[in-house]
Image (spheres, rainbow, N blue to C red):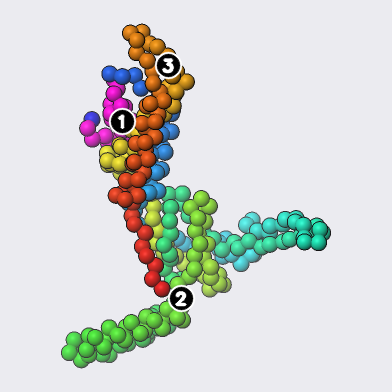
Amino acid sequence: MAKPSSRQGLIDYCLRRLGAPVLEINVEDDQIDDLVDDALQYFNERHFDGVEKVYLKHKITQEEVDRAQGRSIDNPVGIITSTGTSTVGLSTTFQFEEDGSFLQIPDSVIGVNGIFKLDTSSLSVGMFNVAYQIFLNDVYNFTSIELLQYSMTKSYLETINWILSPDKAIRFNKRQGRLYIDMNWTNARVDEYIIIECYRILDPNDFPKIYNDYFIKLYLTALIKKQWGQNLIKFQGVKLPGGVELNGRQIYDDAVRELEEIRQRMSTEFETLPLDMIG
């Protein structure tokens, strides 16, 4: 199978790259399964083809509003109490309140760019907003207004709208799985939808072409080779029938060098470059 399309097909391909079945690859099946998971995790977190940009829709619940406002019985605002020593040597108890304004995010999401506005000013909402009225009254035909003037007016209105209703500040950590939205939750309405712009990992069970990715095949082969050498290191210098000598250290060192080169290539060839921030 030159083009693996399944997990086992990928494993068989990598083992053949290492010499199987001509050579016996001394790596246990459970070890290989762990290495496949490690390779897929690295692929999803670093490779530009390992994720997809999606827009997730979430309906606000009463429980989330109550928790954000500290009214929930089952999920109250967290109280963190700790004891410390002051500069004068006295024991002091500190009490902190933890913000409960978060949404639980699926494990498949590894990054959040932002959310669409929950509320906006009257400049851009409804039939009687300014932008709609300008378009209705002045741009009913393309000869009644200069396009440059219309574009400048739209930009000016967007600036005003941004000042009156700025984007909501968010905080997200993929290990927590929580999206904190820093806003006044009294303005949030139950059953209102939030659109979350985020990046989600690609599941190889849904997209089996991942198993045939060039980087995955290269990286997993090196990982298995490293584990093979590590398993044989303790047999260094052991003579086999026919005068063959095991050299696990050499296999291990070669694999470590290959992995370093592959990770370096990831940074220069397969990883999305960071965008510069201006301002």
Q: Which three-letter amino acid code belongs to the residue tagged 2? A: Pro
How far apart, in angstroms, are the residues tagged by discs 1 and 2?
A: 51 Å
Left/right of residue 6 with respect to residue 33 in the rendered view: left
Q: Which mark is residue 237?
A: 3
Task: Give the residue drawn at x 17%, y 89%.
Answer: 143
Position of residue 228 measured from the top left corner of the image (x, y, whole percent): 40, 26
What's the CA distance linking mark 2 and mark 3? 68 Å
The residue beneath circle 1 is: 14
Q: Which amino acid is tagged 1?
A: Cys
Left or right: 85 in relation to 116: right
Q: Which residue is mark 2?
A: 166
Query: Looking at the picture, does residue 49 appear above or below residue 2?
Result: below
The answer to whether residue 10 is magenta is yes
Residue 186 located within the stretch drawn in magenta: no
**Position of 197 relative to 252 (above/below):** below
Q: Nearer the viewer, residue 4 or 94?
A: 94
First of labels 2, 3 by sequence position: 2
Query: Split into 4 quadrants, where in the image is the C terminus?
Result: bottom left
Q: Nearer the viewer, mark 1 or mark 2?
A: 1
Earlier in the chain: of badge 1 and badge 3, it is 1
First in sequence, mark 1 or 2: give its number.
1
Residue 203 horizontal/vertical position (percent): 36, 44
